[in-house]
Image (spheres, rainbow, N blue to C red):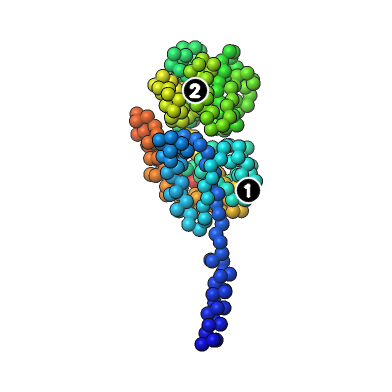
Amino acid sequence: MIRGIRLLSMLLALGAWSPASQARDTLIWVLRDLPPTTIFEGPQKGRGVIDQALPVLMASLPEYDHQVVHVNRARGMQMLREQPFVCDPALMFNLQRAQWIAFSITSFRVFSNGLAVRRQDSDSLQPFIHDGQIDLRALLASAPHNVGVVAERSYGEPIDSLLAQASPGALMAHYGNSAIGNLLQMQRRGRLKALIGYQPEIRFQAQQQGIDPSELAFYPIQGMPRYQSVNVGCSNTAQGRQAVERINRALLELRPDTLLELYAQWLEPALREQYRSDALAFFHDAPQR
């Protein structure tokens, strides 16, 4: 009897030290308040694209424990750079970030950033509009036009390059979670002609500011593709790169239906069918992008 108890104790001790019983790695997900991708406050809290998609993605990675933290943009980037196992579920790829962030394949497609102006001010921009698109390079080089941007945000390679070359007086940058809302209020008061952003984001923020979105005209930016890709970005460490491999496999299952529809619901109804068709074609033609 005693011998049996000793044997059982040894087996339990071995089990306690087995790899399977060790604590799992904790994957920290950083979320920024970026409606309608993520919505932290208000009546639509938790109904953003990533708000609804992230629990599904986490469930597809059962080998990890998961922790979600709310951060501002600067803190999120700092954590990705300095901590070994952090992921951001909604990052735009650019070459500078790719030096220290491991990126997944595309999680979902979004309409590219464009220029929003009040319809009553659109006549003043006519010299810069060609075939329904705005010549941002020419607009930034002109005076006294100034363009509102969210400070330190990546808008995608072509726009980022143009903004980097712009004279300081051509841009009005705002920091913080309320940057788009603040820029829209400046535009309403006539202190700003135009701002750059995603159409669903600007429409959402306009409504939060008591501005009728129909009062705004939205122009695609010349030289930009119709759509941009959103990716998951993780710490560029062994843990982060391994997680990206697992995330890629999960995204192949989630993006054609779940992620696509979660984004489509935020579009104007007239844009939804075309978006669905274009996004599915992209996933079919470039499954590993």
Bin the neighbour count of mark 2 within 10 Å (Cα to Cα): few under 14, some 14-19, many 20 and up: many
Report the side of 36 relative to 20 (left or right).
left
Q: Going 37% across and 36% down the picture, which residue do you hit? A: 265
Is residue 182 in view from this perspective? yes
Image position of 176 with respect to 286: above or below: above
Residue named by callout 2:
184
Image position of 10 with respect to 150: above or below: below
Taking depth in this image into account, of 41 and 53 the one nearest to the observer is 41
Q: Going 46% across and 15% down the picture, which residue do you hit? A: 122
Residue 90, position as x, y percentages in the image: 51, 40
Residue named by callout 1:
83
At label 1, which amino acid type do we have? Gln
Residue 102, position as x, y percentages in the image: 58, 46
Element under label 2? helix
Image position of 250 with respect to 108: above or below: below
Task: Please tell me how many numbered marks the rendered image carries.
Answer: 2
Element under label 1? loop
Image quarter of residue 43: top left
At label 2, which amino acid type do we have? Leu
Task: Compute the Cα span from label 1 to label 2.
Answer: 35 Å
Image quarter of residue 99: top right
Is residue 203 in view from this perspective? no
